[in-house]
């Protein structure tokens, strides 16, 4: 099966669309696959506030989790969807309380949007065999 990637739809710049589209060939028919992602930032407060005159060890550790929603539309009318969750390769730590660092952490994640985009595209590439297998199953059920 040949895989045709719609290169014109790949947006790699920061602030670009949060979608990635791929065009596949399945049994001689076109399949349009759209991957949409959303980022969920998880915070963890660590350390302790220092006593007066002593330094604090408070830190906010954070990790960006990515939820990817895939929708594949086959020319024959089959639609298969899937949700893929994974930690993005973006994490960090900031001094102080998490509540006071949320805006700065959001800026850190925005600055790493290229890494999140690369992660989305890597997940999409690994998912293509699963898309074709799900379409085979849907096609076989429709014939029964």
Image (cartoon, helix red, strand yellow):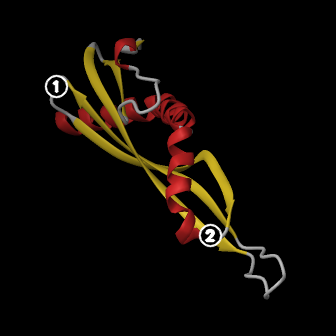
Give the spatial CA distance, label 2 vs label 1: 47 Å
**Quadrant assignment for the C terminus:** top left
Percent across and percent down for residue 72 are 29, 33
**Residue at the right extreme of this rendering:** 54
Percent across and percent down for residue 106 are 50, 52
User: What residue is drawn where x is 67% and y is 53%?
Assistant: 92
User: What residue is drawn where x is 18% and y is 36%?
Assistant: 142
Percent across and percent down for residue 117 are 49, 33
Residue 144 in view:
no
Q: In front: 124, or 120?
A: 120
Residue 93 vertical position relative to residue 5 in the rendered view, above or below: below
Q: In front: 32, or 109?
A: 109
Residue 89 vertical position relative to residue 73 in the rendered view, above or below: below
| Secondary structure category for the residue under label 2 | strand
Which quarter of the picture shows residue 133?
top left
Please name the residue that numbered disc 2 is placed on. 44
Residue 9 in view:
yes
**Quadrant assignment for the N terminus:** top left
Please name the residue that numbered disc 1 is placed on. 76
| Secondary structure category for the residue under label 1 | loop
User: Is residue 138 left or right of 64 when viewed as pictured?
Assistant: left
Residue 58 vertical position relative to residue 140 in the rendered view, above or below: below
User: Is residue 29 left or right of 134 when viewed as pictured?
Assistant: left
Label 2 or label 1, whichever comes before in sequence order: 2
């Amino acid at each position: 099966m040949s895989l045709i990637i719609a290169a014109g739809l790949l947006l790699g710049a920061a602030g670009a669309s949060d979608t990635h589209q791929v065009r596949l060939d399945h049994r001689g028919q076109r399949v349009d696959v759209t991957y949409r992602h959303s980022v969920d930032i998880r915070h963890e407060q660590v350390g302790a506030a220092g006593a007066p005159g002593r330094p604090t060890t408070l830190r906010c550790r954070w990790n960006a989790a990515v939820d990817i929603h895939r929708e594949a539309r086959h020319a024959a009318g089959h639609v298969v969807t899937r949700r893929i969750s994974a930690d993005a390769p973006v994490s960090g730590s900031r001094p102080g309380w998490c509540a006071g660092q949320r805006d700065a952490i959001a800026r850190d994640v925005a600055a790493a949007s290229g890494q999140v985009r690369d992660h989305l595209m890597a997940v999409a590439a690994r998912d293509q065999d699963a898309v074709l297998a799900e379409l085979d199953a849907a096609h076989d059920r429709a014939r029964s």
